[in-house]
Amino acid sequence: AGDFAIGEVTPNRGGDGGDVTVAIRGRSFTPGTTVQLTKVGQANVVATSIDFRPDGRLLSATFDLRGKPQGQWNVLVTNA
């Protein structure tokens, strides 16, 4: 399995009109992992659903971005 790591997040854009699902590639993701979008001065956007690939190398997270401010957000992944 190796150490927990985050690699690529795709897509890297989402807009503000609805749900966006991103694929997060990495290592050692486990059930119970949480994913949020963070931006200074804004409330965190918590993923509404998260799915895992059994090998722990990929997860998908869906966010409701309706009405959220556009611009650069950080992806925060917290392993259980």
Image: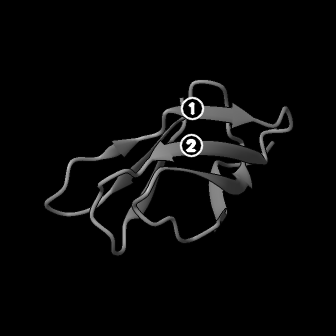
In the rendered image, the residue lying farthest to the right is 55
| Quadrant position of residue 60 | top right
**Residue on which the image places disc 2:** 62
In the rendered image, the residue lying farthest to the left is 41
Q: Residue at x 40, y 52 (%)?
A: 65
- The mark that comes first in sequence, 2 or 1, is 1
In the rendered image, the residue lying farthest to the front is 17
- Does residue 18 sit above or below 39 in this rendering? above
| C-beta proximity under 8 Å, tags 2 and 1 | yes
Residue closer to the observer: 32 or 49:
49
Q: Residue at x 36, y 74 (%)?
A: 72
Looking at the rendered structure, the kind of residue marked 2 is Thr
- Does residue 74 sit above or below 29 in this rendering? below
- Does residue 37 sit above or below 12 in this rendering? above
In the rendered image, residue 47, in percent from the top left (x then y), is placed at 48, 39
Q: Residue at x 30, y 56 (%)?
A: 68
| Quadrant position of residue 56 | top right
**Residue on which the image places disc 1:** 49
In the rendered image, residue 41, in percent from the top left (x then y), is placed at 13, 60
In the rendered image, residue 71, in percent from the top left (x then y), is placed at 33, 75
Q: Residue at x 56, y 43 (%)?
A: 62
Give the secondary structure at mark 2: strand
In the rendered image, the residue lying farthest to the top is 32
- Does residue 71 sit above or below 1 in this rendering? below
Looking at the rendered structure, the kind of residue marked 1 is Ser
In the rendered image, residue 42, in percent from the top left (x then y), is placed at 19, 56
Give the secondary structure at mark 1: strand
The image quadrant where one finds the C terminus is top right
